[in-house]
Amino acid sequence: MTVLVTGGAGYIGSHMVLELVSSHENVVVLDNLSTGFRRAVAPEAKLVIGDIEDQNLVSKIIRSHNITAIIHFAGSIIVPQSVEKPLMYYHNNTAKTRTLIETAVLCGVKHFIFSSTAAVYGMPGREPVSETAPLKPMSPYGTSKLMSELMLKDTATAHDFHYVALRYFNVAGADPKGRSGQSMPRATHLIKVACETALGKRSHMEVFGTDYETEDGTCIRDYIHVTDLTRAHMDALSYLRKGGTPDVFNCGYSRGYSVFQVVDAVKRVSGVDFKVKMSQRRPGDPAAIVAASDKIRETLMWSPRFDDIDTIVSDALAWERKLETLKETA
């Protein structure tokens, strides 16, 4: 049995590969390296450079490597960019996922784990938000992921095909052993941006919106350590292999931090009082969104180990320092 990881050269995907090979799984990575890095892929895994919409290539990989499960990360993830370029997101996140699902069905792959997002909820209006909350995405990014979830649900009804969709809240941090982390240049993720600023890689950072209806006026998010997230995928894979039925789970800690609180944490952990500028809101950003995580804890028996903002920041900072010694090439 072999697991196919799409987008396995990217941030979360590369951590997933580390988790799989540590569990003695056979792993094939499919990545077009548009945003991923060849060096991020664990040497124990086989890297195939290509695109998930290439059905001939994916079919060949499935058959030649006896793929029995697919963990799908490949896609575009920047919310403001999705507002500017919606068709790109519907192509990369929805149309390509549809092709990948079809290929899986045609080749008899029965287990599929999908990288979804809390953006499917939009502005839920209550915290924490559960999996049964209304789905009202505020951006093409969120809509593109929701459409993929709907395709998975319908496909599972019509075929011998079982999936888990994991709705990520805000993923941050890096591998505690320093083997991988967030490497994409011009990143928009708050903790990475703040860490880059603390280390002098940016002259300053911006806070987008200070007039939200929150305690300090800035957005509140539920930050989850990337290693805890990959453990959730391992738990989902085990669940499917044991005959678990298709389902959707939130991935978060059920605790939120405001932008100002995160900035303070980075300043505290780094010991650097860096420059912060206030800017206008970005389109597609809800004021607050925090996960209800009881379902994943009870059903998948998921138990996070890094539920601490200072730990997340510390690992992110360590990775940023390591990046200075790595050549930034794909």
Image: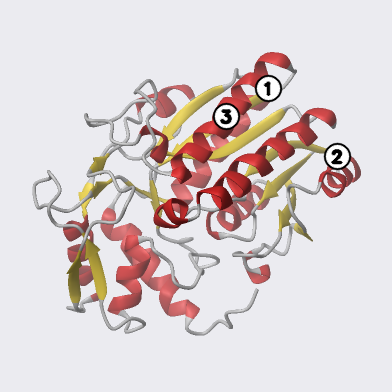
- Please, what secondary structure does the residue beneath circle 1 have? helix
Q: Mark on residue 330? A: none
- The residues tagged by marks 1 and 2 sit, at their Cα atoms, a distance apart of 21 Å
In the picture, measured across the screen, residue 328 lies left or right of residue 158, that is left
Residue on which disc 2 sits: 66
**Along the line of sight, the residue nearer the viewer: 315 or 118:** 118
Residue 291 point in image, percent of width and height: 32, 35
In the picture, measured across the screen, residue 321 lies left or right of residue 277, that is right
> Of the residues under marks 1 and 3, which one precedes in the sequence?
1
Residue on which disc 3 sits: 164
Quadrant location, the N terminus: top right
**Along the line of sight, the residue nearer the viewer: 77 or 131:** 77
Query: Is disc 2 in contact with disc 3, using a CB cutoff of under 8 Å?
Result: no
> Of the residues under marks 2 and 3, which one precedes in the sequence?
2
Residue on which disc 1 sits: 155
Q: Say which amino acid is labelled 1.
A: Thr
- The residues tagged by marks 2 and 3 sit, at their Cα atoms, a distance apart of 20 Å
Estimate how packed mark 1 is, as few (under 14), some (14 to 19) or many (20 or more) residues with alpha carbons within 10 Å.
Answer: some
Relative to 321, say whether 178 is above or below: above
Q: Quadrant of residue 97?
A: top right
**Along the line of sight, the residue nearer the viewer: 245 or 56:** 56
> Of the residues under marks 1 and 2, which one precedes in the sequence?
2
Estimate how packed mark 3 is, as few (under 14), some (14 to 19) or many (20 or more) residues with alpha carbons within 10 Å.
Answer: many
Q: Quadrant of residue 263?
A: bottom left
Quadrant location, the C terminus: bottom right
In the picture, measured across the screen, residue 30 lies left or right of residue 277, that is right
- At x 40%, y 72%, the residue is 318
Residue 269 can be seen, yes or no: yes
- At x 8%, y 47%, the residue is 215
